[in-house]
Amino acid sequence: MNTPAPPHTPDPPSLERVVRGLFLAGWDGHTLSPQVRQMLEAGLRGVVLFAKNIQTPDQTAELCSAIHDAHGPHALIAIDQEGGRVARLRDGFFVSPPMATLGRTATPEQLHDLGRLLGLQLKALGIHLNFAPVLDVDTNPDNPVIGDRAFSADPQRVAECGTALAQGMQSVGVAACGKHFPGHGDTRQDSHLTLPRLPHGGKRLDIMEIPPFQHAIDHGIASIMTAHIVFESLNPSPEDNTPATLSSEVIQGLLRTAMGFDGVVISDDLEMKAIADHAPIEDTAVRAVDAGVDLMLVCHHPDLVVRAVDAIVAAVQSGRLSEDKVHAAHQRVERLATQYRPGLTTPETREREAQELAELEARFAALFGSDPAATNDPTDALGA
């Protein structure tokens, strides 16, 4: 009697492919560039879209389809669709008012439904990761980059609003990302342009900055984005200029251990001047993974991803960076990409979701209006 052959077990991915899976890249253009296509085929986790990539709903859907075709079923396509002035999708799309407007007027139930609206809008295009909600607390009127992107100056209100929006998005299969941990709301400088510092001690952070993130974590938010900000009290010494994105004290000590977050930690764009002006991408990428970042954004120059991947591989091979850390990050990203991915719905479900989306758009347009005039987006050319 013939014994059936054991099922074929695919070879494990190479270290290079695993490391490529820790990056999202950005590029200029309305179609998928040959370079990024090749990178996706070689294991790049996915892309982050900006207004520079988007023309119409049909064009955006075709672009997303090409990205998924190049990578496979576990590609991640990410976007900043907060509402107000930070909304990459505009012409032909519903755009919600700024979060500050919603923070003053909306109920948690309305924000949950708005999250469903945003999620259904993105999901219909093939986008499954939204860099929202902003969980920063708007405590500094001189803040040049947060302002009306935050729900409120009250941390409890930010917690309530942000978690409701995140849960709404995730209820329809789009991963939410709370940002910018541990908090960008009190800075006087823009981390796209320089490296801000905050002196706040642990007591202040526990009262003001941390509660919105803790509330979102306790209610299952899928991912958290780090801030390129020096938190002096969280570093080993006041002279330490390590930003949160590169700090194991912030990511492993505070976010993972103290706050219990086991989802995906995402860096803000590694091309932002707060990071890029202080070290080459090779050093930054190695330090980010070593600190506990799982998924890194390189939003404008794909060549930098190639350099960063080579540096991480070399750091593992030399013993500078633990291979276990690399694989742990890859596993967390893979888990998110598996949970939030296209192809999980039937035609009947898609038809039902399209009907719900149309109903929600009509309801929210009547309730809050749309915000098409808010096109002054300071982050679109710079990062998230």
Image: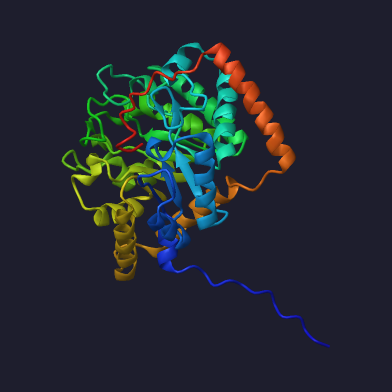
Residue at image coords 32%, 46%? 300
Q: Quadrant of residue 185?
A: top left
Along the line of sight, the residue nearer the viewer: 36 or 198: 36
Residue 208 point in image, percent of width and height? 37, 23
x, y (%) of residue 135? 42, 28
Q: Is residue 188 visible?
A: yes
Where is residue 3 shown, x and y percent of the image? 77, 84
Quadrant of res 365: top right
- Residue name at image x 60 percent, y 47 percent: 342
Vertical arrangement, residue 225 with respect to residue 357, above or below: below
Q: Residue pushed farthest right?
A: 1
At 55% from the left and 21% from the top, the residue drawn is 111
Which picture quadrant has residue 183? top left
| Label tally | 0
In the rendered image, the residue lying farthest to the left is: 239
Q: Which residue is more in the foreground, 320 or 268?
A: 268
Q: Position of residue 17 (x, y in %)?
A: 44, 64
Front residue of 154 and 128: 128
Q: Tell whether 128 sits left or right of 192.
A: right
Image quadrant holding the C terminus, namely top left
Q: Is residue 308 left or right of residue 124?
A: left
Locate the N terminus by quadrant.
bottom right
